[in-house]
Image (cartoon, rainbow, N blue to C red):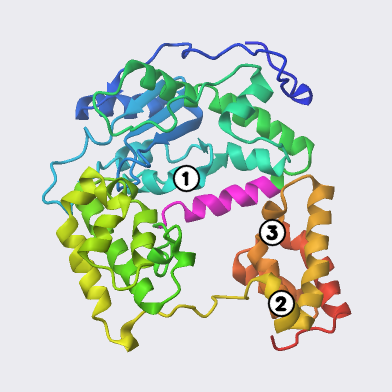
Amino acid sequence: MSAHDPSEGTSAEVELPVLAEPADGVPPVVATADALADSIEALAAGSGPVAIDAERAQGFRYSARAYLIQLRRAGAGTHLIDPDALAPEPKDVDDPALADLAPLGSAIQDAQWIIHAATQDTPCLAEVGLVPTSLFDTELAGRLLGYPKVGLGALIERFFGVRLLKEHSAADWSSRPLPHDWLNYASLDVELLVELRDRLAEELTGASKDEWARQEFAHLAALAARPPQVRQDPWRRTSGIHSVRTGVGLAIVRELWQTRDEIARRLDRAPGRVLQDVAITELAGKPKPGRTELRDVAGFHRRTAKRYETEWLDALERAQRLPRAELPPVHLPPDGPPPPRSWESKDPAAYARFVPMRATMGELATELQLPPENLLTPDYWRRLAWQPPEATEPAVDDFLAALGARPWQREIVVGPLTRIIAEQGGPSGG
């Protein structure tokens, strides 16, 4: 396969050839203990880094677990692992009965794992015992290099001059049996991942960004085993909740959301397939809603939602009989600085720091050719602008380090941000 010059990019007028099938064909799905043992032996005997991908069933299932895991390594070929087939029988409805792939993880523990958009896949990999000690994130590498498109397909096009079709990316991977064309698609996701890693690593070194990438990848690997952070009051993220302006209305949203979540968990179905957000907030916006008002909302007419009408009505009743003191507050105290649009009136001194900091971060990111959010998490410098430490570089460095900024980031931004704090008179007590 001839390489495509990265400097050329891809043109809408040039129809690139499609990477239609893996060079070695589609391997059989690993669905038995014996087949898994063979895969472990083969992958352990392979050489170099290991390409890994996972397919979930987002939008279809409640869980975010992996329903297919793809691995590829030089000398071992591609392996398609079916975690569901390898899982023990569930004990009860609350037992996810996940496969234990820790022996596979141990067999490739010393290798670097190549993952595209690692934060999407490491949680579901960790659930089945696959935790990297070293990884290379091809999407993040593309971001650090300042590429305008960093999807796997775009990077494959950029470096190899072929198109990677993504027609099954939103498929229901919990379906069984998995169609051959889906397995072909899944195999292709790791077909060129090792070669892509090599090309990106070369580009990072050439751009003197390899140390940045090393620190970023080490940070991702350190977080790989941690469970996803549970948001406080996740029901407050219900679409359309901004239109609900009373404590009673918010209590209705909360009770309906929690009821839907329980039903979705029992059914292992995506919550939106049980009841759409818009139905929850529309009903919560009605004064004293009951059975009649519920039946007036179109979202409750859907077959699954209609089946649980009694539970929705119970949720409405619970919410509306709460004493005032137990109603959720309409406005929560901010966890951190308020929205910057309010700073000019709330704290003019903080706003005077915010404006030049925003401009400086943009200028630095442009100069270094990477997205501003990869130079430094925006929340970090906003917190610094809102309530900074004393205007010394060690103090600012400690402040950003405590929030999680990596050393390479601090080396770049601490000096300019410290100067802004000093020029604007330091902390105001915000």
Report the residue at 33% width, 62% height from top: 283
Q: Disc 3 and disc 2: Cα gap in Å?
A: 21 Å
Inspect this view and state whether residue 313 appears.
yes
Quadrant into which the N terminus falls: top right
Give neighbour class at mark 2: few <14, some 14-19, many 20+ (Cα, 10 Å): some
Look at the picture and state if 377 lies above or below 214: below
Given contact means CB atoms under 8 Å apart, are the residues at marks 1 and 3 in contact?
Answer: no
Inspect this view and state whether residue 133 appears.
no
To which residue does mark 3 refer? 376
What range of the chain is rendered magenta? 212-226
To which residue does mark 2 refer? 343
Magenta stretch contains residue 193: no
Q: Disc 2 and disc 1: Cα gap in Å?
A: 34 Å
Q: In this view, does 315 lie to the left or right of 140?
A: left
Look at the picture and state if 40 lies above or below 95: above
Quadrant into which the C terminus falls: bottom right
To which residue does mark 1 refer? 120
Q: Which amino acid does label 1 sit on?
A: Gln
Q: In which quarter of the image is residue 255?
A: bottom left
Report the residue at 31% width, 50% height from top: 299
Image coords of residue 367 (percent x, y): 84, 49
Q: What residue type is labelled 3?
A: Leu
Report the residue at 81% width, 49% height from top: 366
Q: Is residue 187 left or right of residue 316?
A: right
Query: Judging from the image, what secondary structure is the residue with disc 2 in?
Result: helix
